[in-house]
Image (tube, rainbow, N blue to C red):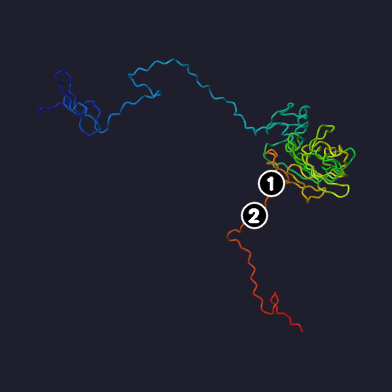
């Protein structure tokens, strides 16, 4: 039996013939054997399963396929982005505050007084003299003279106290004549000090407000905010209609023109008559000078309202009352709205908390047993009546 060789046979051209299975063509993936060269099955069969895709328009950002010429465009210089900046992002407006505002909140005085103190050079920030309008953060070291001011930029509510001032007390911390000061009647505080919102004369009584916030004191007393002050005035005599119209229209005084926003009579007996007046500024002895301009003497003057805060009727002379958090928050909200809609609206006390329902499993109070109907001839307690002899 002749031996067969595994080498491919050479064709007429001298090239060896490769086996059909090793023709180098990729498998079709259909499982059929590859067609032999030179046969009709060599031509590709049309694919009837999927129709040919229609040519679509090329988007401008698509790459141009090979073989197509791209239209010439003008050369545009490429601007490369620089590396990201390493500077810190700007902090929120609440992260820092003005220096005079921080000092006023610390209870050192009003903003105007703090501005004057900064201009004197007695305030140091991180060892350097402070300037007006400088902003500080909690990490900064603030000193007034040798005293270091510690502050936190928090949303803590300020303390507010209502005091019923009697006659014979002065609204100052030190008096050379040794008269009684209203600050002697206030409770002591650890940090800061009490600031008086407005002043009352030595012979004037009524509502006096104190707070630990210089910003709140400035907001209520600054002339540009025009917060109402209401007084009850007793004069010797009576205001005529012409004088009343002049007081509402404007009266020239030594320090400028002044007027009442409201002048209403409240009655009186004999030569004494009571009036209710409303002003929007706190100049020294303004109400008394308005009546003295027409020759009317004020025998008693009492402040009964400041903004939306009324003098409580139950608060006796010489006593003070601290506002609750709800009442303080209502005052701040009223100031945030611009101070409108006050009229005679007092600061309302906080609403009473509703009673909690009893928890499950808790013992409920036993109900009182119903009384049995009284028998005929018995009293309401159930005992038989005694017959009278």
User: In front: 256, or 116?
Assistant: 256
> From what the image shows, is residue 363 above or below residue 255?
below
**SS for dot 1:** helix
Q: Position of residue 387 (x, y in %)?
A: 74, 82
* Residue 361: x %, y % from top left: 58, 61
Looking at the image, the residue that sits furthest to the front is 242
Return the disc, 1 or 2, that comes first in the chain's sequence.
1
Please name the residue shown 66% across and 76% down the image. Answer: 374
Q: Quadrant of residue 30?
A: top left
Is residue 61 toward the left or the right of residue 112 in the image?
Answer: left
Q: Which residue bears the numbered disc 1?
A: 326
Image quarter where the N terminus lies is top left
Which residue lies under the disc numbered 2?
A: 354
Of 207 and 281, the residue lying toward us:
281
From the viewer's perspective, tell me whether residue 373 is left or right of residue 299.
left
Question: In the image, 134: left or right of 55?
Answer: right
Residue 55 shows in this picture: yes
Answer with the quarter of the image where residue 61 lies: top left
What residue is shown at x 10% (from left), y 27% (from top)?
A: 2
């Amino acid at each position: 039996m002749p031996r067969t060789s595994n080498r491919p046979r050479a064709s007429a051209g001298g090239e060896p013939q490769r086996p059909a299975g090793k023709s180098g063509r990729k498998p079709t993936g259909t499982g059929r054997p590859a067609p032999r060269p030179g046969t009709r099955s060599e031509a590709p069969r049309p694919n009837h399963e999927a129709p040919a895709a229609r040519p679509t328009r090329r988007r401008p950002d698509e790459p141009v396929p090979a073989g197509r010429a791209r239209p010439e465009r003008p050369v545009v210089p490429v601007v490369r982005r620089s590396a990201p900046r390493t500077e810190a992002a700007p902090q929120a407006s609440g992260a820092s505050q003005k220096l005079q505002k921080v000092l006023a909140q610390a209870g050192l005085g009003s903003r105007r007084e703090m501005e004057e103190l900064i201009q004197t050079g007695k305030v140091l920030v991180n060892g350097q003299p402070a300037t007006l309008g400088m902003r500080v953060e909690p990490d900064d070291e603030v000193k007034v003279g040798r005293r270091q001011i510690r502050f936190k930029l928090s949303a803590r509510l300020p303390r507010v106290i209502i005091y019923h001032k009697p006659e014979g007390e002065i609204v100052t911390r030190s008096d050379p004549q040794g008269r009684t000061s209203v600050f002697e009647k206030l409770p002591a505080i650890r940090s800061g000090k009490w600031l008086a919102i407005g002043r009352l004369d030595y012979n004037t009584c009524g509502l006096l407000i104190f707070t630990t916030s210089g910003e709140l004191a400035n907001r209520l007393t600054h002339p540009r905010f025009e917060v109402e002050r209401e007084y009850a005035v007793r004069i010797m005599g009576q205001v005529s209609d012409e004088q009343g119209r002049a007081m509402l229209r404007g009266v020239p005084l030594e320090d400028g023109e002044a007027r009442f926003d409201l002048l209403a009579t409240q009655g009186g007996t004999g030569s004494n008559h009571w009036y209710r007046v409303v002003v929007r500024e706190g100049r020294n002895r303004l109400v008394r000078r308005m009546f003295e301009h027409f020759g009317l003497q004020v025998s008693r003057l009492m402040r009964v309202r400041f903004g939306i805060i009324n003098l409580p009727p139950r608060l006796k002379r010489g006593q003070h009352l601290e506002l609750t958090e709800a009442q303080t928050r209502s005052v701040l909200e009223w100031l945030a709205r611009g101070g409108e809609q006050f009229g005679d609206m007092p600061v309302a006390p906080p609403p009473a908390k509703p009673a909690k329902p009893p928890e499950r499993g808790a013992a409920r109070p036993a109900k009182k047993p119903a009384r049995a109907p009284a028998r005929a001839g018995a009293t309401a307690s159930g005992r038989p009546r005694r017959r009278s002899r």
